[in-house]
Image: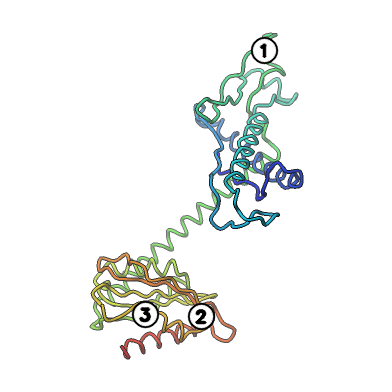
Amino acid sequence: VGHAEGPQVNDPDAPEHAADVDSHFSWWRTIWLAQLSRAQEGNASARLWAEPEFGPPPYLQTLPYTRAPVTDLWDVNKRVAARIRTEFAVALEEASAPPAPAEEVAADSQPQKVWVPQLGGGYVLKDAPASGGGGSSGSGSRLSTKAVSGIGGSLLDLAIKDGAKEEKERIAAAEKHEALMKAAAEVSVVIGKSESDCAVAEFEMADGDVVMLNAAMTAINAGAAGAKSKILFSAGNDQLALVGYVPASKTGLNVAEWTTRVLQAVGGTVMSSQPAEAESPYGGKVVQAASAAQDKVTPAQAMVIGMKAASAFLGAS
């Protein structure tokens, strides 16, 4: 039914956090109701549940609000998880609420449904027990799309629109990745045909993105160009990205020293990874790095400086 992120509090039942917690779960119940409405129109035998991810996040070193050391975070997680399951049960009860008076006539003509908890976990939609008077008006429960109209229905519409937006973004990302791989293949051919054992090249397609530039490096190394040491540069609006690679056979060149010399020449605020095993049929090490845009030096200008430094290092080696 969806990921239920817990509220960022040290105790979900503490009075001082009641407003934040209630607001948080009101938001989630709205989402759950919209999803339950959609589920009714799909597979009637589907089992639905909300099971929170469990375990302390590695970045959290102190508890929210109190700033106390995280010594009882597992216990906090247990309490938050229990509250999430309780709130989900409340959402199921709301989803199974009797229809409004205006809907009763239409509701009587349909089997009424309720969400029933299962022994193994989760809920399934089943027929409600018949009322004592033989009628179903008022005493039964069913989930209808009208029951979650208003804010729930609006959120469902929004979710559908968001889904369409995400699909467009996914297609755009796939097209960009395809273009990235095509450009990498072209660069791989050029470097592979070069008589030099090393290459210093610009890869504009990555647009200053270190992850994309590293993906391009992996693609380039899949061909004959993988046998050659190289540094790729890509200047974006906010930073200069660079990825250095040295195959296992080139023992006389240290990729960490090479990229460090380049970063020293570029200056500014830089970040660099430790040398890691490269995804290349030629083995070797790869280093990813970035330099943030400076006040008087743009990423494009920094790239020119870096490429000169990379070539100079090779000449001095």
In this image, 27 relative to 217: left or right? right
In this image, 57 relative to 204: left or right? right
State the separation of the CA atoms marked 2 and 1: 73 Å
Secondary-structure class at tag 1: loop
Residue 249 spot, x, y in % from top left: 23, 74
In this image, 138 relative to 80: left or right? right
Q: Is residue 168 above or below residue 208?
A: above
Q: Which residue is mark 2?
A: 299
Residue 247 image-quadrant placement: bottom left
Residue type for callout 2: Pro
Counting residues from the start of the chain, the first of labels 2 and 1 encountered is 1
Looking at the picture, the colour scheme in use is rainbow
Q: Which residue is mark 1?
A: 131
Q: Quadrant of the C terminus?
A: bottom left
Residue 201 got which mark? 3
State the separation of the CA atoms marked 2 and 3: 15 Å
Q: Which residue is located at x 36 percent, y 68 percent?
A: 276
